[in-house]
Image (cartoon, helix red, strand yellow):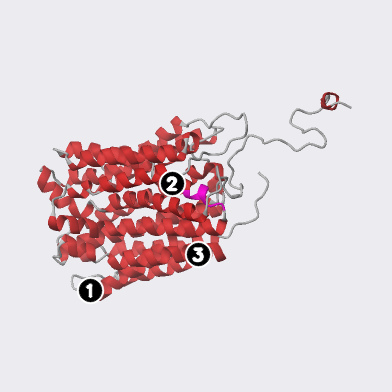
Amino acid sequence: MSAKSLGRGRRPDRPLPGTVPGPRRPTVTATTPLAPPPVQTALSARRRWTVLAVCCLSMFLVGLDTTIINVGLPAIGRGLGTGTRGLEWIVDAYTLVLAGLLVTSGALADRFGRRRVFQTGLVVFGAASLVCAVAPSAGVLVAARAVQGVGASMLSPVALAIVVNAMPDPKERAQAIGVWASVFGLSMAAGPVTGGALLAGLDWRALFWINAPVIAAALLLSAVFVPESRGQRAPGQPARRLDLPGQVLLTVLLAAVVGVLIEGPRIGWTSPLALAGYACAAVATAAFVWVESRRSEPLMDLRLFRRPVFGGAVAGAVAVFVALNMTLLLNTLYLQHTRGWTPLAAGLATLPLAAGATVCAPWSGRMVGRTGPGLPLLLAGAFITAGGLCLVRLTPHTPVLLLLAAYALIGVGFGFANAPITNTAVNGLPPARAGVAGAITSTARQIGAALGIAVAGGLVTGAGPTQLAQASRPGWILVCACGVLLFLVARLSRPKPPADA
């Protein structure tokens, strides 16, 4: 009997008897397990870890630029003749644009090629850094910082997707993510130290000139060592469409929430402008949920958050970066304004935090590969909580050794947390959406960073040098609460057998 006759009367979605069904149009659900990501060609172990090193170089830039500028804000204000509000927007323009575009950049990388988008991000970031370095006014600097955020959004999730694609073995991938996480944590903690050192011998423009040689090296190395990869699609299946309405609504939502948190202490929490911000955030949230739930290929599949493992990982990422950024900002303000330390000395005080994160993140990655994310998350929660407790009674005369011990504990906790959270979130999406998986976790980190900075700044606004220590105490209580939240995330981290979608 011919295949044609066999096909008569057959339902169009049923395969011919004795044949293997062809690939069907993939959908992203909360129960889709992670298979080893396909690669274009098999890479040697040396090549795989070289790819990781190149991606870590770019991630170091993204993290460094998030925190390096903080210690230079007074010098920037004097050099450009701008006040506190202008300085706030110099910081926030970068963070807001970065957070708003991360998911779309990850989707673009999955569609058009991860190496191509990665290199484009390097070029945009490098060009914007040069404009920052020669900016003649605060307005030009704010605009250039926003463009820096555009370039950075193409680096963070895409670098993680490249690493996931190059590491097919789950245990090796977990170790690689641990290294990647440690570099990112080290870069954020190293920002104040690097910034203080540059300001000690140069002016504030050196904070941006330093990016040029790193960008040049990353471009060259990525062209030589990083293979091209894309999100895998079934033969004959059209490329994933961009969700522009979802992107616009997500950007509006993040801008409204972060903007109100930052400007609230200045404009008043019940002022008409603040109330308009609350309304804008509420409307944007409702519209985003409505639009995303009705699209066949949404920017962010909200069904993922029904899975406790994935939702817990995203919440944990927010909590960890709230704790980290609150610690960095409160440390800088307290040591410089209350204790009278120089920017370099205040930056050096974060070295225990950086050391703890650097040492423990690779260790955490190996633990995730061997035993899963539960144990490192429990350790992370314990260390962050202990570090916050050390400073809940902070005074202008708190012993320096206690300060350094607290920073070290928080750094160790951060090091243990980042790898299991990132690995768990990435494993919540199929490999074809690795770019979006990295983008969601990176967005959560930037939201946490913005929240931590906004809340910390609001707590100490208007406090004089002698009152700043007491005013910052609620911030350290919040750091403890973030650590406690990680205990809950650890309980949710054990994946359950997937149910049929």
Please state the horizontal and vertical placement of residue 18, each as a whole percent of the image: 82, 37
Nearer mark to the viewer, of 2 and 3? 2
> Label 3 amino acid?
Arg
Residue 255, visible in the rendered structure: no
**Residue 302 magenta-highlighted:** no
Q: CA distance from mark 2 to mark 3?
A: 25 Å
> Camera-side residue: 114 or 149?
114
Which segment did they paint magenta? 163-168
Dividing the picture into quadrants, the one containing residue 405 is: bottom left
Residue drawn at x 22%, y 60% as measured from the top left: 332
Q: Main secondary structure of the magenta part?
A: helix
> Which residue does the numbered mark 1 point to in the structure image?
400
Nearer mark to the viewer, of 1 and 2? 2
- Label at residue 250: none
Nearer mark to the viewer, of 3 and 1? 3
Q: SS at mark 3? A: helix
Residue drawn at x 10%, y 48% as measured from the top left: 78
Q: CA distance from mark 3 to mark 1?
A: 33 Å
> Camera-side residue: 452 or 213?
213
Left or right of 401? Residue 420 is: right
Residue drawn at x 22%, y 62% as measured from the top left: 347
Q: CA distance from mark 1 to mark 2?
A: 45 Å
> Which residue does the numbered mark 3 point to in the structure image?
366
> Label 1 amino acid?
Val
Please state the horizontal and vertical placement of residue 229, each as a whole percent of the image: 50, 40
> Label 2 amino acid?
Phe
- Label at residue 225: 2
Residue 334, visible in the rendered structure: yes
Please state the horizontal and vertical placement of residue 203, each as a whole percent of the image: 13, 51
Please state the horizontal and vertical placement of residue 308, each as a whole percent of the image: 55, 54
**Residue 167 magenta-highlighted:** yes
